Image (cartoon, helix red, strand yellow):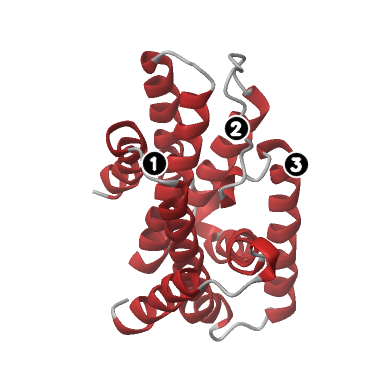
Amino acid sequence: MTYILLLLSVLLGACLVIFIQLPKKVVRLLLAFSGSYLLSITILHLIPEVFNGANDAKKMGLLILIGIVLQSVLESFSKGAEHGHIHLHGHENKFPLLLFISLCTHAFSEGLPIEHANDNLLWAIMVHKIPIAIVLTTYLMHSNFAKKTIFTYILIFGLMSPLGVFVADKINFFSIYSREITAIIIGVFLHISTIILFEGSENHSFNIQKFVAIVLGIVLTFVIV
């Protein structure tokens, strides 16, 4: 079921672009909600789980910092697609290979700790994947790729997190070091979610709709999850 849910979250994001063509304003609100949800899950659930009863808190903190740095490196290739910042150029037809590899690496790494964590991590990643799939699909469609090509690459991207879950389940290394891997992913999540939430709005003005989306993500995490 985990494999199916992860894949469906990506396909849902792609379908929202292909069949509904969501306005940019709605996509931004979805990003704000997903960033809020991701940050809330990380702070309220993942961080306490990693540090609970730990005698190696300093090591866990270092691994979180490593996750932040690793995500910074990946974003130098992905151009910020993880938080909705692919720049669209309508007449490009050359596939952005480095961007795609970076996104796939990010998605694969997200799947590694899922098998050894509770459902909170799974839901956080699913919510996070929907707007990423929206942004990636939008980019591919604006770049004039054939629909078959778009579907192929979206499917490959969608399979990366399930592949990470599968690899972690089959290789004992990921079971032994599940806390350490989760700590690194916490760093990745902190980097992505804080950029989504706290980067400046246009003219640095207060956006009530974005604020509501952020509060909704926090409330849902605190009350439901």
Q: Which residue is mark 1?
A: 162
Label disc, if present, on residue 76 of the rendered structure: 3
- Mark 3 or 2, which is nearer the eye? 2
Look at label 3 and name its amino acid.
Answer: Ser
**Element carrying mark 1:** helix
- Graded by Cα atoms within 10 Å as few (under 14), some (14 to 19) or many (20 or more), the crowding at tag 3 reads few
- In percent of the image, x 48 and y 75: which residue is there? 208
- Graded by Cα atoms within 10 Å as few (under 14), some (14 to 19) or many (20 or more), the crowding at tag 1 reads many
Along the polypeptide, which appears first: circle 2 or circle 1? 2
Look at label 2 and name its amino acid.
Answer: Leu
Q: Is residue 167 visible?
A: no
Q: Is residue 174 left or right of residue 14?
A: right
Instruction: Compare residues 91 and 55 and report the one nearer the observer.
Output: 91
Instruction: Compare residues 105 and 136 and report the one nearer the observer.
Output: 136
Q: Which residue is mark 2?
A: 88
- In percent of the image, x 63 and y 23: which residue is there? 97
**Element carrying mark 3:** helix
Q: Residue furthest left?
A: 1
Q: Position of residue 170 (x, y in %)?
A: 42, 43
Q: Position of residue 1 (x, y in %)?
A: 23, 48
Rounded to the nearest angstrom, the CA distance separating label 1 from label 3 is 24 Å
**Element carrying mark 2:** loop
